[in-house]
Structures are given as structure tokens and as C-alpha cells.
Image: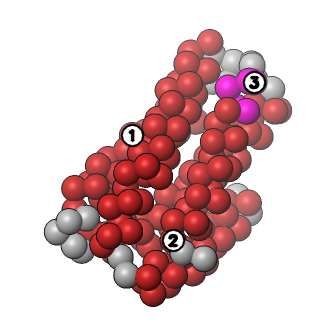
């Protein structure tokens, strides 16, 4: 498995969770659970992706711009997650923020898969792509387990 295949696995989970979240309403256990799952998925993925995809790319001149853009989008999503966490789940504005988050997630994933991955594929060597995948998956699993245990 290479880094691109590893990242796509989480991307599919993110898409599914963000779409399901938008189908919820009010302060329900379903909304709480889906939000928790999405928040945890984004956190584990983003942490591992930053460390084992974007930081190695940032070390190259040709990877610097895509890395800056991607990290800025990660920050925007983090801020929306924080806003959702601080907003009452029954607030009518909650779903509007969740929609903005879902739109940003979908935009970011599409951009990564259709642009960043192609550029990164030219920068990273095959062995590096495989090594980064292993490191990414180990870090992703570590953070998924931490979030399941309620430590984040």
C-alpha cells in the first residue's frame, strides 16, 4: 500500500460521516454520535496526514505551496469543529455550520485526490510512498484508539 491509498481509506469514512451528520436534526443521540465519530476521524486523519504526508512534502521546494494550502484548510476545518463543539446541538444554526464543514471536507478531499496527490506523486519516490503509508497508518490507528478512549 502507498500513502495515497492509505489516505483515501479515511477520506471515504470522512465523506460518509459528514453526509450522515447532515441528515440529523436536533439534540439527538444520533447527532452526538455522528459528530463525535466525524470529529475523531478528522482529528486522527489530519494529525497523521500532517506528519507523514505534508511535512515530508514541505521539505521540498515543489511541495511547499500545496502543503501550505492544505494545512490552511485543515486549520479552517479545526475551527469549524470547535464552533460546532461550542454550539448547542439544538441550535438551528448548528446544522448550517455542519453544512459548511461538510462542504469544506468534500472540497479538501477532492482537491487532495485530484491535484495534490498527482503533484506529490512526482515528488515522492516509490519506497518513500510505501514507508509513509506505514507510518501514516500506525499514527492514524494510534489517534483513532486515543479518541475512542475519550482522551482527546
- From the image, tell me which residue sits under label 3: 24
Task: Work out which residue is located at the far top of the displayed protein and give it.
Answer: 92
Tell me the distance, in whole angstroms, between the alpha carbons under discs 1 and 3.
23 Å
124 magenta-colored: no
Q: Position of residue 78 (x, y in %)?
A: 46, 44
- From the image, tell me which residue sits under label 1: 76
Residue in the picture at 67% in, 64% down: 144
- From the image, tell me which residue sits under label 2: 3
Q: How many marks?
A: 3
N-terminal-most mark, 1 or 2: 2
N-terminal-most mark, 1 or 3: 3
Query: Viewer-nearest of labels 2 and 3?
Result: 2
32 w.r.t. 90: above or below: below
N-terminal-most mark, 2 or 3: 2
Q: Which residues are magenta?
A: 20-24
21 magenta-colored: yes
Q: Secondary structure at mark 3?
A: loop
Tell me the distance, in whole angstroms, between the alpha carbons under discs 2 and 3.
33 Å
Amino acid at each position: 500500500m502507498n500513502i495515497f491509498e492509505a489516505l483515501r481509506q479515511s477520506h471515504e469514512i470522512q465523506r460518509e460521516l459528514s453526509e450522515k451528520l447532515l441528515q440529523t436534526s436536533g439534540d439527538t443521540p444520533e447527532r452526538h454520535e455522528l459528530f463525535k465519530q466525524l470529529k475523531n476521524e478528522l482529528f486522527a486523519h489530519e494529525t497523521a496526514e500532517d506528519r507523514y504526508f505534508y511535512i515530508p512534502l514541505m521539505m521540498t521546494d515543489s511541495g511547499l505551496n500545496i502543503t501550505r494550502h492544505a494545512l490552511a484548510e485543515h486549520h479552517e476545518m479545526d475551527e469549524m469543529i470547535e464552533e460546532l463543539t461550542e454550539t448547542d446541538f439544538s441550535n438551528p444554526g448548528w446544522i448550517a455550520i455542519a453544512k459548511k464543514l461538510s462542504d469544506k471536507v468534500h472540497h479538501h478531499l477532492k482537491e487532495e485526490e485530484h491535484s495534490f496527490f498527482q503533484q506529490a506523486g512526482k515528488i515522492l519516490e516509490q519506497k518513500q510512498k510505501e514507508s509513509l503509508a506505514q507510518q501514516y497508518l500506525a499514527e492514524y490507528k494510534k489517534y483513532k484508539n486515543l479518541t475512542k478512549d475519550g482522551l482527546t
